[in-house]
Each structure stands twice: as structure tokens, then as C-alpha cells.
Image (cartoon, rainbow, N blue to C red):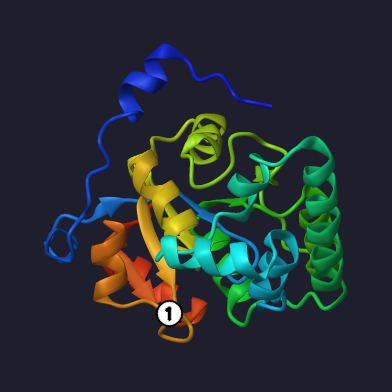
Amino acid sequence: MTFLLSRTFLSLTLRPSCSISMANLTTNAKSRLRGVVFDMDGTLTVPVIDFAAMYRAVLGEDAYKRIKAESPTGIDILHHIETFSPDKQQKAYEIIADYEKQGIDKLQIMPGAAELCGFLDSKTIKRGLITRNVKKAVDIFHQRFEVIFTPALGREFRPYKPNPDPLLHICSTWGIQPNEVMMVGDSLKDDIACGKRAGAFTCLLDETGRYGPDDFSVSGLQPDFKVDSLSKIQNLLEKNFDMDP
């Protein structure tokens, strides 16, 4: 489904995304923070899905190599599937479902996630979730780890990341402006792009040092913050944001 935003809310939010520089965030005037929205796979959960193998299975080896060479920021597999014939789409989604099921079987919460959520709760900061995985995987995450995010949107919500609509929908549901929200995720092309386009603060989780200045330059996406562990976000928030109720 596509969430219809009010004209008033659109006029306040759908503006060119302004990148908040680190210099601005270190001044005495702290920015207001009222909500944090997380990606799930690779952010709230330990990465277990072999995405490269999944993309090869869906696209075929030759197409995978060609598309990868043409897409320096990463392959948007869901976008490519939408260009397939109906029969080919069904087969592709079956392949993805199989890989995602394997991921669910091995599901582990990311170190620091529960503690970070506890900190946000103590500050009455709202928590939401946006994933390109299916809603069933989100439900299993909630049940298994008893850490609940509301709203929690799977790829059934259209359009999905990197389109800003899921994040704007959550902001509207909360009654909070995007510039009072942070998007946290491990994907530059999906999570950071979604946050930037919505006008939110962005934090890139990069555990392995995958991203560097060249990636930011090529993509035109510069996260406001970059951390190598969820455990570092609490200090980041306390230092840079006003989180008083």
C-alpha cells in the first residue's frame, strides 16, 4: 500500500534534503531528536544472508557481473525484479524467499541493539523499523528478541527504501517532523538515501570499514554520522542531540 500524506505535512517535509555537517552538530545549540528509525538486516540483526550469492541466483552470473559493474553503490535487486516478466518475477521472489528463510533460521540480534533500545526508551525516544525484508521476518524478530519497533514496515509497504515514503509515513504516524528523526542503517544506497531524501539525520553502521570517501563522493550521499558499532550510538546521541521530553 502507499500511504497518502496530507498536503500540510508534505509542504513541511518534501524539501531538498539538507546535509547537517558535523561542524553544525558540534555547536552549543543541539538539534532536537524525538525518534530513531532502524534498518533490520545487518543493522539490528547480525548479517547472515549471502546477498552476492542471492543476486547471482536471481540475475544469472553474466547479468550479475554487468549490473554490478554499472552500479558502484550496489545492486537494487528488487528494482531489477520489477522489470522481469510475471513468471520470472515469481521465480525470483521464490529464490529470495529461500535465502531469507535461511537468514531467519540463523537470526541473531546485533550486539548493542537491545542496550541501545533500552537507552532510547529511557529517554522516551520513539523507535521504528524499515526493512526490504518481508513483514514475517520482522514479526519473528519481535517475537524472538522481544524488542518491539512501531511502526515496523516490510517491503510490502510500497514504495520501499530508498524511496523516502516509508520514513515519511513513520514520521506522520508519530506526528514528528523528519528533521527530528534519525535513520540508522548499514546500506548507503538504501538507508542513508532514504533518510537524506526524507530530510532526516542519518547514521551509517559500517562494522567492516566497507565505505570510504570515494563511496560517498560517487553516490552523492554523505551520512551525518558513521559508526562501526551500535554500542557507539548512545554516546553520539548524548553528545549531539537534545533528547529531553
Q: Compared with residue 6, is residue 146 higher up or lower down, i.e. above or below?
A: below
Tell me residue 71's x, y (percent).
43, 61
Place residue 180 in its image quadrant: top left
How many marks on residues?
A: 1
Tell me residue 184's x, y (percent).
47, 61
Secondary structure at badge 1 equals helix
Place residue 9 in its image quadrant: top left
Which residue is drawn at the image coordinates 44% and 47% (left, top)? 194
Q: Amino acid at mark 1?
A: Lys
Q: Compared with residue 115, is residue 17 higher up or lower down, i.e. above or below?
A: above
Asked whether 104 or 189 is in front, the reply is 189
Question: Left or right: where does residue 17 sit relative to residue 10?
Answer: left
Q: Which residue is mark 1?
A: 232
Tell me residue 15's x, y (percent).
28, 30
Residue 116 visible in the shown view: yes
Which residue is drawn at the image coordinates 63% and 34% (left, top)? 158
Question: Left or right: where does residue 131 sit relative to residue 206?
Answer: right
Label 1: few (<14), some (14–19) or many (≥20) C-alpha neighbours in 10 Å = some
Q: Compared with residue 183, is residue 187 higher up or lower down, i.e. above or below?
A: below
Asked whether 38 or 120 is in front, the reply is 38
Rendered-image quadrant of the N terminus:
top right
Tell me residue 2's x, y (percent).
62, 25
Question: Left or right: where does residue 76 sit relative to residue 10?
Answer: right
